[in-house]
Image (cartoon, grey):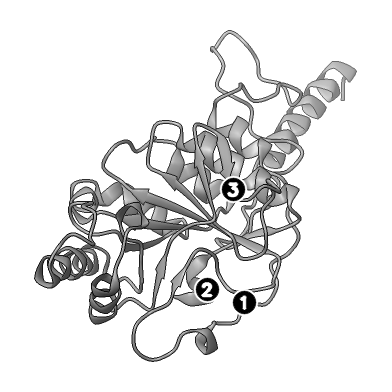
Amino acid sequence: MPATRVRRLLAVVSLVALSACTSHAIAGPVTVARPSASPPSPSVSPSVSPTPSTPPKRGTLEWYVAQVPEFPPLPPTPQLREAIKPGEPPFWLRVPTDQKVAFITIDDGGLARPEDVPAFIRSAGIPVTMFLNSPAATAHTDYFKEIEAAGGVVENHTISHRSLPGLSYSSQKHEICGSADKLEQLFGKRPTLFRPPFGDHNDTTMTVAHECGAKAVFYWSETVDKGIVRYQTPEKILHPGDVLLMHFRPALMDDLLAALKAIHKAGLTPALLEDYVG
């Protein structure tokens, strides 16, 4: 066979092998793993040939996935039934566990829904709990179902996002049970966790949350906004069981990445809240 033809044949084989190497297996929904050393090349104009050494363009989905740290494996995840007594649910700022895990939660849903978020959660295997207002869930069901399909879980955050302590028993029940009913209708599963708007609650809130099916009511340990983690302790480091709060806002991709980096810095692994208390 002529040498030129051999060289062309080898070039074709090399390109086929290179194409096969760009496929990447994603970690499961409750673990986060660093992508392979050869992430997919970013989009380029037809006149430019992509190469394996071309880094993803900053701000693209591929770039965000490439920034995700590599975490240790998740520890066994026992249900904390012994910490949840009959009657009213507990009110927790953090999950009472010594395991080296932290939890990512995203609230509301009505303000903004960045289009790459479901793919980022799926591609990076980010475990998230969504505390949704039921009108937002109704208006944007497909979006939240995409996140649910990627391993996210939908939980309750009332109908109108009003501060609850100033409301009567019947009004609080309408807000909490009404939202739980709607979320169950939309997603086929009744919420078992509840976060009151602003974290505001009173004894009536806790009673009604229990009557509406909540096993636990959550506040948070840290907040994340515009890519910045805001700590509520002077150490400025996460602790086992911490719950990070962010919202469906325009900078949610940056918030998710900042949360993952903070969790990694603390020597923790992101876990799914429902695996512990759902």
Q: Is residue 278 visible?
A: yes
Q: Is residue 24 visible?
A: no
Is disc 1 placed on a helix, strand or loop?
loop
Between disc 1 and disc 2, whose residue precedes?
1
Classed neighbour count for the residue bearing mark 2: other residues with Cα under 10 Å, few (<14), some (14–19), many (≥20):
few
Residue, disc 3: 124
Percent position (x, y) of residue 126? 55, 53
Circle 1/circle 2 CB separation < 8 Å: yes
Residue at (23% x, 64% y) in the render: 183
Front-most of 175 and 268?
175
Residue, disc 2: 275
Front-most of 138 and 35?
138
Is disc 3 placed on a helix, strand or loop?
helix
Residue at (72% x, 41% y) in the render: 21
Between the residue at mark 3 and the residue at mark 1, the CA separation in whole angstroms equals 20 Å
- Indicate whether 208 appears above or below 118: below
